[in-house]
Image: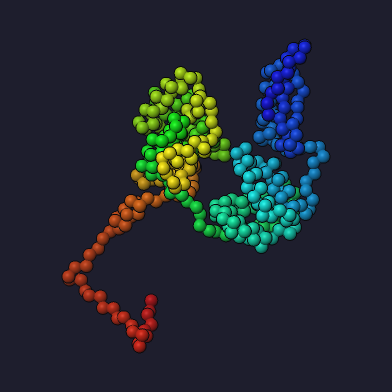
Amino acid sequence: MAIQKIKRKKGTVYRVYFRNPHTGKVDFRPSTDSLKDARQADSAIKHRLEFEPASFLPADFAPPTDTPLLSELLKEYNQHAHMTDVTRKQTFYHIRRVVDFMPSVEVADLSRAKLKEMERAMRESGMKQNTVQRRVSIVLSCLNWCVDEEIIAENPLQGYRCRRGEDLKLIPPTPDEVALIYTHALPHIRRALTLAWYLGVRPGASELFRLAWKDVDLDNRMIRVWSAKKNTDMVIRELDLVDELATPLAVWKAEDMAIGTPWVVHYRGAAINSIKTAWRTTLDNAKITRRIRPYDLRHAFATQALAEGADIKAVSEVMGHNSTAMILKHYQHVLNRQKKHALNVVPKFSITEESPSLNIVIPTSEEPQKWKN
């Protein structure tokens, strides 16, 4: 959506336009000669699109029939269910792949057997376990949403659980790998890497690329992190700056004040929302062949902090989680030195010469013996 500036003989007018999320068509609002009024109308529409999308439903909208296609329900769910813009975009991508495997299945014919068949086909196509689980969960969430919205009477897959498999858990980068990546990185990649490594923020537009200089207090050595929109219980996190981060931040701020950019991570002064291409190029230049994602820096933060004895609740809150369960289940990767330490800290015992011998009778095949508990 945007504000259109139109020059006419009697003066300049402004008109707000946006794409209706339900019809896909561009809607135009009445023009006004006040830019302020246009901006207010633009803000009001943005609010409705975010929190009241159903208010844009056409007057003749009717929910699907009693036996709609699963693909139709998935479309309704993606358009009308409450979720962030990023989640909606990701969900749309997954829904397209689900429809490829179940293109013409009516909800009335949907069964556990059909969903298991879809699971099996996805795995046979080479799809990772995490992706299979994500797509099955979208189908189940869609059906539950449709029941709540009274589009269907009941969820035919209520209580269904995706077959467990081996989750894909990539080993987070080591400090040596991070140093190697930093050496071959462009300036904006170096900034992103340094901040993600020392703060454990979510790499991407949800947190890392939202960091602004107004949220950095170098005098008090503190940075304010605005949590991802999905984290409604912890909107802001105020984190201390370690020396290894405060020093480069001071240098970066001096550079950015000269060009007038408000963002801590940017590309030649312009805001960015993705570093995928530059990240892959950096790994190629560093001759790193194994898969390392920017998000793995967040995993590395949790892993290294816990390995050094940091309190798990503190690590959880620094990373923007209220529960430590997420850290233990998804983010902590046990290091080899931790395993070695676990083996070495078990209290030792020794058998002295005065210790009684252990008389154990070993049964032979000729004389089978029953062991008693």
Viewer-side residue, 321 vs 84: 84
Residue 130 in the image: above or below residue 217: below
Q: Position of residue 31 (x, y in %)?
A: 76, 21
Residue 348 in the image: above or below residue 5: below
Q: Position of residue 230 (x, y in %)?
A: 57, 39
Viewer-side residue, 60 vs 16: 16
In the rendered image, which quarter is residue 155 located in? bottom right
User: Which part of the image, by quadrant, shows the C terminus?
Assistant: bottom left
Extreme residue toward the left, this view: 353
Residue 188 visible in rendering: yes
Viewer-side residue, 66 vs 264: 264
Viewer-side residue, 350 vs 94: 94
Residue occupying the point 37% across, 38% down: 179
Q: Position of residue 94 (x, y in %)?
A: 63, 47
Residue 225 in the image: above or below residue 370: above
Residue occupying the point 51% across, 24% down: 269
In the rendered image, which quarter is residue 91 located in? top right
Q: Position of residue 279 (x, y in %)?
A: 48, 38
Residue 234 visible in rendering: no
